[in-house]
Image: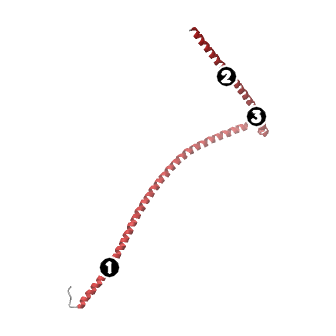
């Protein structure tokens, strides 16, 4: 180092040097603090980027799931619409048939109503008809019973005659066999 003749000047440089060294040290400390903060900030950015990527992936997966679910629901809706259309068509046809039947029945009722005299609508008329109907039903039941009995008798006769024919056939067969044996 070169010394000037002026010691004050040397001292001033030394002081300046010391001040500069102190300032450099302080700046180094600040730089170190800033580097630490920068490192923390970079770590935070990396965490955010990972979180962002994960979130994007989750959102994409959710969107895919929603799309699949929506497609399934649309397919089910289409199926239900088709089924409803078929059922609706059948119900409308059935309703149309029932309406036609109702109209026919109403017309028949009106025709029948016009043919019966006003006095015949009384309660006594119908109560008189009930015993007649019961009487006719009983007669038909008796006739059916007679027919059933006759059928049983005929079945027994048929069975008896069939058995008799069967026995006659066996006897005739055995006699023919004997005659054939004798002749041979």
**Toward the viewer: 68 or 35?**
35
Q: Residue at x 32, y 78 (%)?
A: 28
- Separation of disc 2 and disc 1 at Cα? 134 Å
Q: Secondary structure at mark 1?
A: helix
For label 3, the SS is helix
Image height of 90 relative to 17, above or below: above
- The residue labelled by disc 1 is 27
At which x and y percent is residue 7? 23, 91
Q: Is residue 2 left or right of residue 145?
A: left
- Check disc 2 and report the residue beneath it: 159
* Residue 134, numbered label: 3
Is residue 129 toward the left or the right of residue 51 in the image?
right
Q: Quadrant of the C terminus?
A: top right
Question: Which of pointers 3 and 2 indicates the residue nearer the eye?
Answer: 2
Residue 64 falls in image quadrant? bottom left
Question: Where the N terminus falls, by quadrant?
Answer: bottom left
């Amino acid at each position: 180092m070169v010394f000037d003749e002026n010691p004050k000047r040397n001292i001033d440089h030394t002081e300046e040097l010391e001040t500069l060294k102190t300032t450099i040290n302080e700046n180094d400390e600040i730089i170190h603090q800033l580097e630490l903060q920068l490192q923390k900030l970079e770590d935070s950015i990396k965490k955010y980027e990972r979180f962002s990527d994960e979130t994007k992936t989750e959102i994409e997966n959710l969107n895919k799931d929603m799309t699949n679910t929506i497609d399934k629901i649309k397919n089910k809706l289409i199926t239900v619409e088709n089924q409803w259309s078929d059922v609706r068509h059948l119900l409308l046809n059935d309703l149309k048939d029932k309406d036609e039947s109702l109209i026919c029945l109403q017309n028949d009722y009106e025709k029948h109503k016009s043919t019966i005299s006003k006095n015949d609508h009384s309660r006594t008329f119908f109560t008189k008809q009930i015993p007649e109907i019961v009487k006719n039903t009983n007669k038909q039941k008796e006739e059916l019973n007679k027919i059933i009995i006759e059928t049983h008798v005929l079945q027994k006769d048929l069975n008896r005659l069939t058995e008799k024919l069967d026995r006659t056939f066996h006897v005739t067969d055995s006699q023919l066999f004997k005659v054939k044996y004798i002749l041979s």
